[in-house]
Image (cartoon, rainbow, N blue to C red):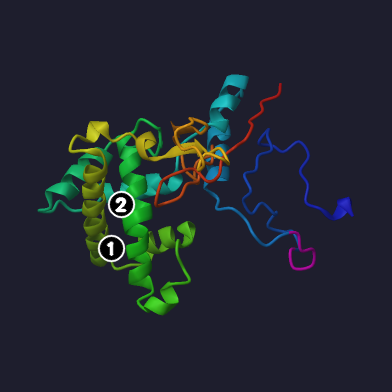
Amino acid sequence: DPGTLPRRIDPPEGYLATANEMNLPPDFPAEERKLGFEWAEPWRARRIRAVLDGQSRHTLEQSCALQGDDVSEPAQRLARLVRALPKGADADVEAARILLSPFDGSLHENSAAAALIELFWVRHLRPALLEALVPDAQTRRFLPPGDTQSLMERLEMGLDPAARDALLARTLGAAFRECRTRMGADSDSWPWGRLHHALFAHPLSSLRPDAGWNVGPLAVGGAAASVMHAEYRTDTFRLTHGASVRMVVD
Protein backbone atom coordinates (compact mmCIF):
# COMPACT_ATOMS: atom_id res chain seq x y z
CA ASP A 1 0.00 0.00 0.00
CA PRO A 2 1.73 3.23 -1.11
CA GLY A 3 -0.02 5.08 1.70
CA THR A 4 2.05 3.20 4.28
CA LEU A 5 5.40 4.21 2.76
CA PRO A 6 7.44 7.07 4.21
CA ARG A 7 6.87 10.34 2.40
CA ARG A 8 7.69 14.05 2.48
CA ILE A 9 5.79 16.81 0.73
CA ASP A 10 7.24 20.33 0.42
CA PRO A 11 9.90 19.79 3.12
CA PRO A 12 10.99 22.94 4.94
CA GLU A 13 14.58 22.46 3.72
CA GLY A 14 13.34 23.16 0.20
CA TYR A 15 14.74 19.97 -1.33
CA LEU A 16 14.63 16.18 -1.27
CA ALA A 17 17.95 14.33 -1.41
CA THR A 18 19.16 10.79 -0.96
CA ALA A 19 22.30 8.79 -1.68
CA ASN A 20 21.37 5.23 -0.75
CA GLU A 21 21.74 5.96 2.97
CA MET A 22 19.40 4.75 5.71
CA ASN A 23 16.72 7.42 5.25
CA LEU A 24 13.68 6.03 7.05
CA PRO A 25 12.13 8.64 9.38
CA PRO A 26 12.90 8.12 13.10
CA ASP A 27 9.23 7.41 13.84
CA PHE A 28 8.74 4.95 10.96
CA PRO A 29 7.60 1.50 12.26
CA ALA A 30 10.48 -0.35 10.64
CA GLU A 31 9.89 -3.52 12.65
CA GLU A 32 6.33 -3.78 11.35
CA ARG A 33 6.90 -2.57 7.78
CA LYS A 34 10.20 -3.99 6.65
CA LEU A 35 11.43 -1.99 3.66
CA GLY A 36 15.14 -2.76 3.61
CA PHE A 37 18.13 -3.94 5.59
CA GLU A 38 21.18 -2.84 3.62
CA TRP A 39 22.21 0.79 3.29
CA ALA A 40 25.19 2.73 2.05
CA GLU A 41 27.29 4.65 4.55
CA PRO A 42 26.09 8.19 5.28
CA TRP A 43 28.98 10.23 3.88
CA ARG A 44 27.54 11.07 0.46
CA ALA A 45 24.09 11.99 1.78
CA ARG A 46 25.61 14.19 4.49
CA ARG A 47 27.79 16.00 1.97
CA ILE A 48 24.82 16.64 -0.35
CA ARG A 49 22.78 18.10 2.50
CA ALA A 50 25.68 20.22 3.74
CA VAL A 51 26.14 21.75 0.30
CA LEU A 52 22.43 22.38 -0.27
CA ASP A 53 21.92 23.78 3.23
CA GLY A 54 24.65 26.33 2.50
CA GLN A 55 22.90 27.67 -0.61
CA SER A 56 19.99 30.09 -0.70
CA ARG A 57 19.41 29.19 -4.36
CA HIS A 58 20.54 26.20 -6.39
CA THR A 59 21.54 26.61 -10.03
CA LEU A 60 21.99 24.10 -12.82
CA GLU A 61 25.74 24.69 -12.66
CA GLN A 62 25.76 24.00 -8.92
CA SER A 63 23.77 20.82 -9.48
CA CYS A 64 26.30 19.63 -12.05
CA ALA A 65 29.13 20.42 -9.63
CA LEU A 66 27.41 18.59 -6.78
CA GLN A 67 26.94 15.41 -8.82
CA GLY A 68 30.69 15.40 -9.48
CA ASP A 69 31.66 16.44 -5.94
CA ASP A 70 34.84 14.66 -4.81
CA VAL A 71 34.93 15.59 -1.10
CA SER A 72 35.30 12.66 1.32
CA GLU A 73 34.22 12.99 4.95
CA PRO A 74 36.38 10.01 6.07
CA ALA A 75 39.39 11.65 4.42
CA GLN A 76 38.65 14.91 6.25
CA ARG A 77 38.45 13.11 9.57
CA LEU A 78 41.65 11.17 8.97
CA ALA A 79 43.48 14.37 8.07
CA ARG A 80 42.34 15.98 11.33
CA LEU A 81 43.77 13.05 13.29
CA VAL A 82 47.05 13.31 11.39
CA ARG A 83 47.33 17.06 12.01
CA ALA A 84 46.82 16.44 15.75
CA LEU A 85 49.72 13.99 15.98
CA PRO A 86 52.56 15.08 18.24
CA LYS A 87 55.73 15.88 16.38
CA GLY A 88 58.06 12.89 16.26
CA ALA A 89 61.46 11.87 15.01
CA ASP A 90 60.26 10.08 11.87
CA ALA A 91 61.00 12.37 8.92
CA ASP A 92 58.48 10.59 6.68
CA VAL A 93 55.68 11.07 9.19
CA GLU A 94 56.51 14.76 9.48
CA ALA A 95 56.63 15.15 5.70
CA ALA A 96 53.23 13.46 5.49
CA ARG A 97 51.82 15.79 8.14
CA ILE A 98 53.05 18.80 6.19
CA LEU A 99 51.51 17.47 2.97
CA LEU A 100 48.14 16.91 4.68
CA SER A 101 48.18 20.18 6.64
CA PRO A 102 46.11 22.19 4.09
CA PHE A 103 44.05 19.18 2.93
CA ASP A 104 40.30 19.90 2.87
CA GLY A 105 39.01 16.44 2.00
CA SER A 106 38.79 17.02 -1.75
CA LEU A 107 40.00 13.91 -3.56
CA HIS A 108 40.81 15.75 -6.75
CA GLU A 109 42.56 13.72 -9.40
CA ASN A 110 45.54 16.13 -9.33
CA SER A 111 45.92 16.12 -5.54
CA ALA A 112 48.97 14.50 -3.93
CA ALA A 113 47.33 14.77 -0.51
CA ALA A 114 44.37 12.78 -1.85
CA ALA A 115 46.71 10.03 -3.06
CA LEU A 116 48.43 9.87 0.31
CA ILE A 117 45.27 9.89 2.45
CA GLU A 118 43.55 7.17 0.39
CA LEU A 119 46.62 4.93 0.23
CA PHE A 120 47.16 5.54 3.96
CA TRP A 121 43.63 4.37 4.80
CA VAL A 122 43.02 1.46 2.46
CA ARG A 123 46.46 -0.13 2.41
CA HIS A 124 47.94 0.67 5.84
CA LEU A 125 45.75 2.14 8.57
CA ARG A 126 42.55 0.14 7.97
CA PRO A 127 44.29 -3.29 7.96
CA ALA A 128 46.37 -2.32 11.00
CA LEU A 129 43.30 -1.07 12.84
CA LEU A 130 41.46 -4.34 12.15
CA GLU A 131 44.47 -6.23 13.46
CA ALA A 132 44.53 -4.14 16.63
CA LEU A 133 40.79 -4.54 17.24
CA VAL A 134 40.61 -8.25 16.32
CA PRO A 135 43.84 -9.96 17.41
CA ASP A 136 42.62 -13.45 16.44
CA ALA A 137 43.85 -14.00 12.88
CA GLN A 138 41.25 -16.65 12.04
CA THR A 139 38.39 -14.35 13.02
CA ARG A 140 39.98 -11.42 11.21
CA ARG A 141 39.95 -13.36 7.93
CA PHE A 142 36.20 -12.74 7.67
CA LEU A 143 36.29 -8.99 8.33
CA PRO A 144 38.24 -7.17 5.57
CA PRO A 145 37.90 -4.64 4.19
CA GLY A 146 36.00 -3.54 7.30
CA ASP A 147 33.09 -1.16 7.75
CA THR A 148 34.53 2.34 7.35
CA GLN A 149 31.94 4.03 9.56
CA SER A 150 32.46 1.65 12.49
CA LEU A 151 36.25 1.67 12.14
CA MET A 152 36.34 5.46 11.97
CA GLU A 153 34.30 5.72 15.18
CA ARG A 154 36.58 3.27 16.98
CA LEU A 155 39.63 5.12 15.72
CA GLU A 156 38.36 8.46 17.00
CA MET A 157 36.79 7.40 20.29
CA GLY A 158 37.45 3.73 21.05
CA LEU A 159 41.24 3.57 21.41
CA ASP A 160 43.70 4.76 24.00
CA PRO A 161 44.98 8.11 22.61
CA ALA A 162 48.66 7.16 22.94
CA ALA A 163 48.12 3.79 21.24
CA ARG A 164 46.08 5.47 18.52
CA ASP A 165 48.77 8.07 17.83
CA ALA A 166 51.41 5.35 17.63
CA LEU A 167 49.25 3.39 15.19
CA LEU A 168 48.60 6.48 13.08
CA ALA A 169 52.28 7.47 12.98
CA ARG A 170 53.48 3.97 12.09
CA THR A 171 51.00 3.47 9.25
CA LEU A 172 51.28 7.05 7.98
CA GLY A 173 55.04 6.70 7.62
CA ALA A 174 54.57 3.42 5.77
CA ALA A 175 52.01 5.02 3.45
CA PHE A 176 54.29 7.94 2.68
CA ARG A 177 57.11 5.56 1.81
CA GLU A 178 54.82 3.51 -0.43
CA CYS A 179 53.79 6.67 -2.29
CA ARG A 180 57.46 7.50 -2.78
CA THR A 181 58.20 3.98 -4.05
CA ARG A 182 55.24 4.02 -6.44
CA MET A 183 55.50 7.57 -7.74
CA GLY A 184 58.94 9.00 -7.01
CA ALA A 185 60.60 11.19 -4.42
CA ASP A 186 58.84 14.43 -5.39
CA SER A 187 55.37 14.57 -3.85
CA ASP A 188 54.35 17.06 -6.55
CA SER A 189 54.32 14.07 -8.90
CA TRP A 190 51.81 12.14 -6.76
CA PRO A 191 48.42 13.07 -8.27
CA TRP A 192 45.59 10.85 -7.05
CA GLY A 193 44.56 10.17 -10.65
CA ARG A 194 47.93 8.59 -11.31
CA LEU A 195 46.77 5.71 -9.12
CA HIS A 196 42.98 6.03 -9.21
CA HIS A 197 41.78 5.31 -12.73
CA ALA A 198 39.02 4.00 -14.95
CA LEU A 199 39.79 1.33 -17.50
CA PHE A 200 37.19 0.03 -19.92
CA ALA A 201 38.57 -3.25 -21.21
CA HIS A 202 37.35 -4.69 -24.50
CA PRO A 203 36.14 -8.29 -23.96
CA LEU A 204 38.55 -9.53 -26.66
CA SER A 205 41.55 -7.44 -25.66
CA SER A 206 43.30 -10.47 -24.16
CA LEU A 207 43.46 -11.99 -27.64
CA ARG A 208 45.08 -8.91 -29.15
CA PRO A 209 46.65 -6.85 -26.33
CA ASP A 210 48.26 -4.40 -28.77
CA ALA A 211 45.13 -3.67 -30.79
CA GLY A 212 44.24 -0.56 -28.80
CA TRP A 213 40.70 -1.69 -28.14
CA ASN A 214 40.69 -0.73 -24.46
CA VAL A 215 39.65 2.74 -23.31
CA GLY A 216 41.90 4.11 -20.60
CA PRO A 217 43.40 4.17 -18.13
CA LEU A 218 41.71 7.51 -17.39
CA ALA A 219 42.59 9.54 -14.29
CA VAL A 220 39.61 9.94 -11.96
CA GLY A 221 39.13 11.76 -8.67
CA GLY A 222 36.88 10.94 -5.74
CA ALA A 223 36.26 7.65 -3.97
CA ALA A 224 33.37 5.59 -2.64
CA ALA A 225 32.70 8.16 0.10
CA SER A 226 32.40 11.06 -2.36
CA VAL A 227 29.11 12.21 -3.86
CA MET A 228 30.47 11.31 -7.30
CA HIS A 229 30.99 7.74 -6.02
CA ALA A 230 34.15 6.29 -7.54
CA GLU A 231 34.83 3.06 -5.66
CA TYR A 232 37.99 1.18 -6.58
CA ARG A 233 40.05 -1.96 -6.07
CA THR A 234 42.62 -1.45 -3.33
CA ASP A 235 45.31 -3.47 -5.13
CA THR A 236 45.19 -1.74 -8.54
CA PHE A 237 43.14 1.41 -7.72
CA ARG A 238 41.00 0.66 -10.77
CA LEU A 239 37.39 1.83 -10.54
CA THR A 240 34.76 -0.79 -9.84
CA HIS A 241 31.75 1.51 -9.41
CA GLY A 242 30.70 4.83 -10.89
CA ALA A 243 27.93 6.61 -12.72
CA SER A 244 27.12 5.49 -16.27
CA VAL A 245 25.12 8.69 -16.84
CA ARG A 246 24.39 11.84 -14.86
CA MET A 247 21.37 14.04 -15.47
CA VAL A 248 20.42 17.55 -14.41
CA VAL A 249 16.91 18.72 -15.30
CA ASP A 250 15.47 22.21 -14.98
At label 2, which amino acid type do we have? Leu
Location of residue 202 in the rendering, given as x and y in whole percent from the top left corner: 56, 37
Q: Residue, x 24% and y 31% (percent of image)?
A: 188
Q: Residue, x 52% and y 39% (percent of image)?
A: 205
- The front one of 67 and 18 is 67
Q: Answer with the quarter of the image where residue 72 lies.
A: top left
Q: Secondary structure at mark 2?
A: helix
Residue 31 shown in magenta: yes
Q: Residue, x 49% and y 37% (percent of image)?
A: 208
- The span from disc 1 to disc 2 (Cα, nearest Å) is 9 Å
Location of residue 25 in the rendering, given as x and y in whole percent from the top left corner: 70, 54
Q: Residue, x 68% and y 57% (percent of image)?
A: 26
At label 1, which amino acid type do we have? Arg
- The front one of 89 and 217 is 217
Could you say which disc has been placed on residue 164 in the image? 1
Q: Where, quadrant-wise, is the C terminus in this rendering?
A: top right
Location of residue 23 in the rendering, given as x and y in whole percent from the top left corner: 66, 51
Dominant secondary-structure state across the stretch colored magenta: loop
Could you say which disc has been placed on residue 81 in the image? 2
